[in-house]
Amino acid sequence: MENFYHLNPQEYIKATFKADMSNEYRFYLQHLKPKGKILEIGFGSGRDMLYFKNNGYDVYGIDIEDEFVEHAKGLGLNCEKVNIMDFNSGDKFDGIWACSSLIHFTSDDLENVFKKIKSLLKDDGVAYVSFKYGDYEGYIAEKYYTYLTKEKLKKYNLNIIDMHISKDTLNRGNDWISFIFKK
């Protein structure tokens, strides 16, 4: 996973920065209190952090790729290089945004990732998470992927309050499952 992004950061930023995420923003923000504090996990190009910041949210981001962190800081965003499992914060968040970033964890590791996310949320906080939709787990080219379905999600015993399946905004030919869960 890290190798692909490490070798192709500018290509990834260019390919994803202008994607139209307006439907996903609406889907998420209807569940989040206005002007709350958001943690973005795996922010990549910084596109979503910038959107939330420009719309009055207090946003902090974490990513494991140096060039993504430097790019985001260049956009005036508050972030650091750290893996979600190593991230420690004295603050709790009203919302967590993990748009297509957790797909690189194994299905077994996701249980601990979801526990970590719950530990970072305020009691009334909500997390947005998206995965490629389907029943696949393994490497595609240089990246490891875990796809999810509604059935596979049951394994994690999450308090899911909303869910939908949508087309890929970058027209790569796959569907996405996005869901909101509470602590």
Image (cartoon, rainbow, N blue to C red):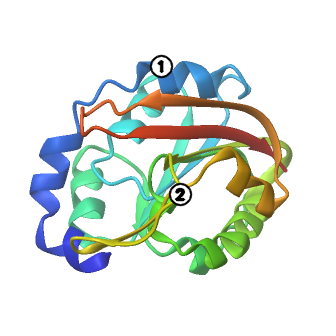
Q: Residues within 10 Å of mark 2 (few under 14, many from 20)?
A: few
Q: Residue 158 appears at what percent x and percent y?
A: 82, 53
At label 1, counting other C-alpha atoms closer than 10 Å, the crowd grade (few under 14, some 14-19, many 20 or more) is: few
Residue at x 30%, y 71% (from the top left corner) = 65
Element marked by disc 1: helix
As measured in the structure, the alpha-carbon distance from the residue carrying label 1 to the one carrying label 2 is 24 Å
Work out whether residue 82 or residue 109 is closer to the camera in this orientation and state it.
109
The amino acid pointed to by label 2 is Asp
Quadrant housing the N terminus: bottom left
The x and y percentages for residue 155 are 78, 63
Residue at which label 2 appears: 135
Specify whether 47 is left or right of 38.
left
Q: Please state the horizontal and vertical placement of residue 11, each as a whole percent of the image.
A: 10, 54
The three-letter code of the residue at mark 1 reads Asn
Residue appearing at x 35%, y 33% in the figure: 168
Front residue of 146 and 57 = 146
Report the front residue among 148 and 159: 148
* Residue 183 image position (x, y, % from top left): 85, 50
Asked whether disc 1 touches disc 2, contact meaning CB atoms under 8 Å apart, the reply is: no
Q: Which residue is mark 1?
A: 23
Q: Secondary structure at mark 2?
A: loop
The residue sitting at 68% across, 19% down in the picture is: 30
**Rendering quarter of residue 35:** top right
Q: Nearer the viewer, mark 1 or mark 2?
A: 2
